[in-house]
Amino acid sequence: MLINYVLLKSNKGNRYISKQLSVNSQQLELLYTYYSILTTLNR
């Protein structure tokens, strides 16, 4: 995350960072869905 912030500081990295952030948010959504499914099954 710190590396992302450093890249965000430079103008060249801006487009790359926005791409990375969108991918990361998709992965986070998947992880969250998976986690909620697991917790539901464990009850």
Image: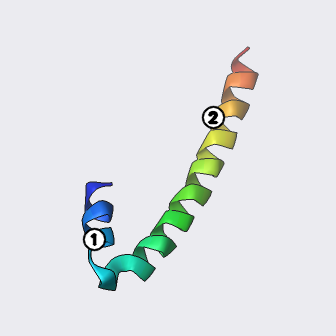
Position of 2 relative to 20 (above/below): above
**The residue positioned farthest toward the bottom in the image shown:** 12
Q: Where does residue 6 sit, x and y in percent of width and height?
A: 24, 65
2 lies above or below 9: above
Mark 1: give few (<14), some (14-19) or many (20+) Cα within 10 Å.
few
Residue shown at 50% from the left, 74% from the top: 19
Image position, residue 3 (x, y; %): 26, 62
Q: Nearer the viewer, residue 43 or 1?
A: 1
Query: Residue at horizontal 69%, vertical 41%?
Result: 33
The first of marks 2 and 1 along the sequence is 1
Q: How many marks?
A: 2
Residue at 32 percent across and 63 percent down: it is 4
Q: Are marks 2 and 1 in contact (CB under 8 Å)?
A: no
Q: Which amino acid does the dot numbered 1 rest on?
A: Lys
Pointer 1: what residue?
9
Dot 1 falls on a residue whose secondary structure is helix
Nearer the observer, 21 or 10? 10
Q: In the rendering, at what x and y percent does residue 39 appear?
A: 67, 24
Image quadrant where one finds the C terminus: top right
Residue 35, numbered circle? 2
Q: Nearer the viewer, residue 14 or 19?
A: 14
Q: Quadrant of residue 2?
A: bottom left
Q: Nearer the viewer, mark 2 or mark 1?
A: 1
Amino acid bearing label 2? Tyr
Is residue 3 rendered to the left or right of residue 26?
left
Left or right, 28 with reference to 38: left
Task: Compute the Cα span from label 2 to label 1.
Answer: 33 Å
In the rendered structure, find residue 42 and report the number of the disc placed on it: none
Q: Where on the picture, by quarter, is residue 31?
A: top right
User: Where on the picture, by quarter, is residue 38?
Assistant: top right
Question: Does dot 2 land on a helix, a strand or a loop?
Answer: helix
Q: Is residue 26 above or below residue 33?
A: below
